[in-house]
Image (tube, rainbow, N blue to C red):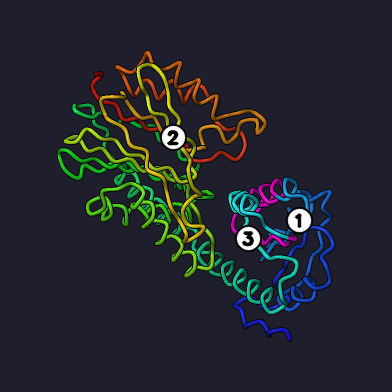
Amino acid sequence: MNINPPAFSKPLHNRQIAVIGQPPETLARELRLFGHLIVVDRDDTSFHMLAYPALSLIIVHGDEQEALIDLTRELRRLHALVPILLYADCFSFDAYVDYMDAGANFLIATDAHPEQINRILERALTQYEKTRSLSRSNEESIKQIQQVQNMMIELMPKETNEEPVQFNYLYHPSFILSGDLLDYHHVSPVFKVLFLLDISGHGFHSAMIAMYLRSLLTGLANRVREPDQILFELNSHLCKFNDRSGDIKFATAVCATMDLEQNILKIANAGNPSPYLIKNGELEAIGPDTHPIGIRTDFKAVVHSYRQQQCDGLFLYTDGLYEDQDAFIDNDRLVEEAVLSSLHLMHDPKALIRHVRNAFPLASGDPDDATLAILTWPLN
């Protein structure tokens, strides 16, 4: 039996729900309980979606994963605030990650019970109305965003160019706010923690999640010594946050610790592009060894340990460096070649990471946040 939808602030007949392609009757029946249904021709999505600027929800369904990802990304570009719900036969782990990163907010399997569909629709529309309520106060929102931006800039770590360890980075947000998180903690004169994280999606929501995780990381860096345990605790917090919020956010992450007293460097990688250990003019890729944080509670990262004397530096980055590039090119290999060609600049780490950044053109379409960082220490 269907559950009657709750009373929303917007009248039922004014709420527009767009479905890309003719929806299955099981889905259409539930959608009509929540608003006016608009069926949009899949072959001319951009033209028709622009004709409906007041949408409350967008439904995408189909069975071709790549087509659904491309369509979701295009719809997110056209409608930044409107929740996007995917209705498909099944969701593999890789598909789940790709859909969310493209901008989807909710996923429903085609064999879902009507009551389950009803609950998800209710949650999606509630999220939209909360978002719209915020956006109506446009001037105040902009002011608040600028304040948050200033706060995020103030919280960025300070570069250090003094021995025993030098730390430099480049930070290119795609929007006024960024979902990339870079932090470098001087826990003590002999113990350092470096952390790089890339929240799925872009903009305000991702930035808020990044700030939430930054506040947690400050405490963790001071009481947890192992990088895999730091990632484990952040994963637990993000999974709990997702359960409470009803939205799904995940993050790729790299955590490195340096014990200068024991001369040991430890690194753990959860789904991030491989950082590179710089060793005598060569590079060693590290991970990833497990899935991003925020997806599953059964999380376990692998720790890679090195004697500091055996290496000269650590280079790490987020995939925004190359996200606008050709998907059929091995971009990780291109990054490796760019770093190798820059090693003659090891005496000037800032110039080295600029050289790598310049090897990749700035995104021309829907760019992602990009962060590059490098740790170096005196050559042995």
The amino acid at mark 3 is Val
Q: Disc 2 versus disc 1: distance between alpha carbons?
A: 48 Å
Is label 2 or label 1 in front? 2
- In the rendered view, does 166 fall on the left or right side of 290? left
- In the rendered view, does 135 fall on the left or right side of 284? right
Residue 71 lies in the magenta stretch: yes
Quarter of the rendering occupied by the C terminus: top left
Q: Residue 51: which disc?
A: 1
The amino acid at mark 1 is Ala
| Residue under label 2 | 286
* Residue 203 on image: x %, y %: 50, 50
Residue at (31%, 24%) from the top-left corner? 311
Local secondary structure at mark 1: loop
Is label 2 or label 3 in front? 2
Q: Are marks 3 and 1 in contact (CB under 8 Å)?
A: no
Q: Are marks 2 and 1 in contact (CB under 8 Å)?
A: no
Local secondary structure at mark 3: loop
Instruction: Examine the rendered structure and indicate whether residue 238 appears above or below residue 306.
Output: below
